Image: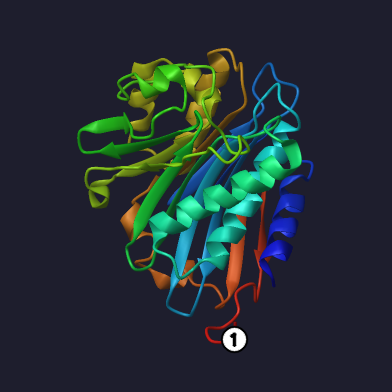
Amino acid sequence: MGQDAIKEHIQLWLSREVANGAVRGLLDSSIAMGSDVGNIRPENQDRVVCVQVQVTASDSFIIGILCDGMGGMASGSKCAGLSIASFISSCVNNLELPVAERLIKAVEEANADVYSIYNSNGGATLSAFIYDSHGQFCAVNVGDSRVYANFAHGIKQYSKDDTFAGQNADAAGVYLSKGLLQYVGVGPELKAQIVSFPKYRNIKRLILTSDGAHYIEASTFKQILNQKLSACELCSRLIQVSKWCGGYDNTSILIVNDLLNIFTEPDKTSLPAGTVKLWDPFGEIQFIGAIAPAGNG
């Protein structure tokens, strides 16, 4: 299956009608994601997806990606869906690249695809990571969706919001900052941000959030994520609390518990070689034979 076909199928799948909210666990509940329209917005323009790509019988990688279509701009949900579809198809098509380069290239291709249609009048934020069966890990961020991690010392935001406030503020807290400096679809000037972690092998919990979750007061947000709960329970609790805090925007969350143990039990993660499998909070889809065997071009 070619890159354009994968992109088209994913984009179509992400545009289907779904419920107002859902939470879903996968890979033996080590990963969970949830999305909810909130109390105010008429449409959920967030999209959050987890992807497993089985390259060979022994090599695979996981992508987690969250995009928040920009409210007030043209076709926010379509921009979010296209951003994710383009990002995933690029990652699948550039397997030879190291993970950081693959993420940057995927952001650039998503940006070019959205810009070619909306000419800076539509766009989406993007927070994503790759983790593979060889232990390589990297994350990237554009806009004001966020990447958090929980080390032994607690929760901290490791991405920086692409806003005036976010680029000049301490990233240790949860704060609201409006007015995006860049987003997927802004145009050729986009500079994606690789997210730096001190020692990623010590991450206890990895979290991606859209800005609906950022209305939760900082100490409450951290207290929830420091609890010894399953990824599904944490997603549900954060969405519920964000709605209690007003539900002013769509809220989407992806949580990974025990990142380094995802591939330690192959029977729970193994797929047929060449398969790409996607989950979102509302369902799953699978492409068998999406990756050509090595040497077949």
Image quadrant occupied by the C terminus: bottom right
Image quadrant occupied by the N terminus: bottom right
Look at 43% across and 74% down and name the residue there: 59
Task: Give the quarter of the image for residue 292.
Answer: bottom right
Examine the rendering and report whether any part of residue 280 can be seen: no
Residue 46 in percent (x, y) is at 63, 34
Of residues 66 and 246, the one drawn nearer to the viewer in this rendering:
66
Question: Which residue has dot 1 on it?
Answer: 296
Of residues 78 and 173, the one drawn nearer to the viewer in this rendering:
78
Q: Circle 1 — which element?
A: loop
Question: Residue placed farthest to the front in the image?
Answer: 188
Residue 49 in percent (x, y) is at 58, 48
Examine the rendering and report whether any part of residue 79 can be seen: yes
Look at 63% across and 38% down and name the residue there: 185
Residue 253 in percent (x, y) is at 51, 36
The three-letter amino acid code for the residue at tag 1 is: Asn
Q: Is 96 on the left-hand or right-hand side of 46? A: left
In the displayed structure, 290 sits above or below 75; it is: below
Q: Is 37 on the left-hand or right-hand side of 263? A: right
Look at 60% across and 44% down and name the residue there: 111
Task: Please rate how many residues cluster around mark 1, counting C-alpha atoms within 10 Å: few if below 14, some from 14 to 19, many from 20.
Answer: few
Task: Give the quarter of the image for residue 180.
Answer: top right
Residue 270 in percent (x, y) is at 49, 72
Question: Residue placed farthest to the bottom in the image?
Answer: 295
